Amino acid sequence: MCAKARRGIDYRSVELDGVRYVIVRESVFDRLCQRANVAAAPAAAAGQTPGAAMDLDGVSLADKLVRRRLAARLSQAELARRAGVRPETLNRIERGHTTPDFITIRKLVVAMDAAEQEFAKDSIS
């Protein structure tokens, strides 16, 4: 009897509004769903709106991003500059017209975290 060697799963994680998410390759996700006997269908394929494909815990990534940006009193142009992304890209993300990749999400999260810390520091002073 030969036992299969178990491999680890390559993944990345991101934290958005205090919630940690794990990002895995789609093929890995599909295998996990098969093993769990769960049907996985992209939100757009399930007849939902394009922005719903980015739905995280009932509140879209776009909505969270806009709320955080406005609370930190940043314009789209300023957040885009701080994150190193094009303003047009940020605009499409905030309108739910595109799903950002992990690198773009990470850039935006890091920039928002820094901006919120600066805003909190300035508010105290």
Image (cartoon, rainbow, N blue to C red):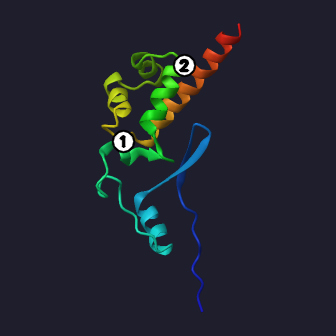
Residue 47 spot, x, y in % from top left:
28, 55
* Left or right side of 48 for 67: right
Quarter the C terminus occupies:
top right
Q: Are marks 1 and 2 in contact (CB under 8 Å)?
A: no
Q: Residue at x 39, y 26 (%)?
A: 85
Residue 10 higher or lower than 31, as above or below: above
Residue placed furthest toward the top: 125
Q: Amino acid at mark 2?
A: Ala
Residue 110 higher or lower than 51, as above or below: above
- Residue wearing tag 1: 99
Residue 27 spot, x, y in % from top left:
41, 63
Which label is found at residue 72?
2
Q: Residue at x 30, y 37 (%)?
A: 97
Q: Secondary structure at mark 2?
A: loop
Q: Give the mark nearer the N terminus: 1 vs 2.
A: 2
Residue 101 higher or lower than 123, as above or below: below
Quarter the N terminus occupies:
bottom right
* Left or right side of 69 for 89: left
Q: Residue at x 65, y 17 (%)?
A: 120
Residue placed furthest toward the bottom: 1
Residue 22 higher or lower than 32, as above or below: above
Sort mark 1 into few (<14), some (14-19) or many (20+) by Cα contacts within 10 Å.
some
